[in-house]
Image: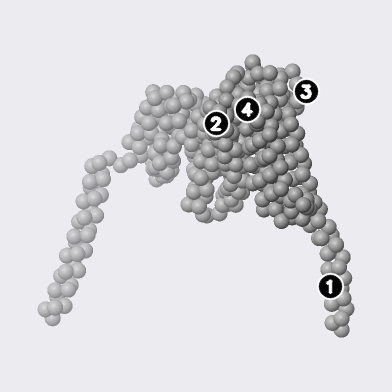
Amino acid sequence: MNRTPSLAIVAAILVALPGTLLSQVRSDFEIVRSFEIESGAIVTAIEAATTTIEIVDVESRIVELDSAYREYRAMIDRALYPDGFAGRLVKLRGQLAYAKDKITIIETQYVRITELETQVRKLSQQVENLAGENARMLGEMRLLKGSEAFDSLNAVIIKLRQGLRQRDDLIFALVDSLFLQYDKDVAVMSDREKRSVAARLERRNVFSGIQQSIKDNVQFLDATELTGNDIVKLGDEHAAFVSKWRGLGKKLADVYAGTASKRAAELATIDTMISRWKSKLGGLYWRTLNNVFVKAAIPVRPFSNGQEFYTILTAYLDEEIRKARDEKDGQRYFRYEAFADSLWHPHIVPDWIPSMVKTGGLTQQHVDTIQEKVDEWEAIVSPPLTAVYIVIGIVMLVVVLYLYRRYMRTREKVET
């Protein structure tokens, strides 16, 4: 009776095994093929190299080839026998040394360019690592957002903000280091030099890196709840990104000017993405502040700028002050407490007012006027000091009488 299930399992394994093996063989084949393609491209680059920059660029590509495929060394040794992995690298370095001897290289220039290229290589790896880390943290933040793990969520948000800002800085530093190797303005570069720059930008994934950086910053805005002060700081970071992009974008436009490359069109795409990022920041500020009032159950009309905020909030306060004067029910103090003690003083004043004043949404005179109305409302709903003193006195008298009676009862029991 057990034979049928066993045969079924064996049959399933036999059916699945060829596909699994084929997938593995295909993967191994693709790795070896990729190694051969890149090493062949390096040979072509060596044969075409006529400048110090091109020599240094090829050296860097050989270093990266070694690093990227070293873990597959045994597989490549079997596939490319007798040269194998090490033999192919030795040949490439020998061809490069021969090409290097054929051109005139100024040693100081070579050293400087080599240092810059090493920096480019390191920055490129750091950008790649941060991209993976930031993507992981974005996913982690979305999971934590619906939980009660506030401390963990805040820690991830802080770390992710730092990671996004660091990657933005790194990718611009990478491109700066690349352009510095040419020691001239892009506008006066030869067509050959521009093609060289374009090829190196492709290898470093500069365009996709910049676009991914913008996307991650926008996703961060969508996935987090921020204060006004936080949003303004993010606005400052956006402005810094824009400033750097303006300088880089002009260089890239010069590199691709007059070419049919799709990258020329992508420059406009990046400009559009940056504009949407800015628009998202502007909308987020007022949308988030409106939600703060909604969550606190404070019935104010929606606002979308500083003047509307001032007008709507002062109208709300004027109405509450009128109600407080006309109505003598017990709810009037609780309404004040819900606004002033639970929202205005602990959240709006420290988290939002400074950013509104800084960006020009409110003037200090506006803030003072609002605060005066809050104080007026408090004065109306709060009991006068005389009444407070009377209440305190009555409470103290009751406590004293209670303690005295308790003392007398205890004394009578002892005497009897």
What residue appears at the point 55 percent right and 28 percent down from the top-left corner? Answer: 107
What residue appears at the point 19 percent right and 69 percent down from the top-left corner? Answer: 406
Q: Is residue 34 left or right of residue 163?
A: right
Q: Earlier in the sequence, mark 3 or mark 1?
A: 1
Can residue 150 be seen by looking at this rendering? no
Q: Amino acid at mark 4?
A: Thr
Residue 272: assigned label: none
Point out residue 346 in the picture as x, y percentages from the top left corner. Answer: 40, 41
**Residue 215 position by quadrant:** top right
- For label 1, count other residues whose C-alpha is less than 10 Å away and answer few (under 14), some (14-19) or many (20+): few
Comparing labels 3 and 1, the label whose residue is closer to the camera? 3
Look at the numbered disc 1 and give the secondary structure of its residue: helix
Labels 2 & 1 near each other (Cβ < 8 A): no
Identify the residue under disc 3. Answer: 260
Q: Amino acid at mark 2?
A: Val
305 versus 41 height, above or below: above
Identify the residue under disc 1. Answer: 9
Identify the residue under disc 4. Answer: 52
Question: In the displayed image of the protein, which residue is found farthest to the bottom?
Answer: 1
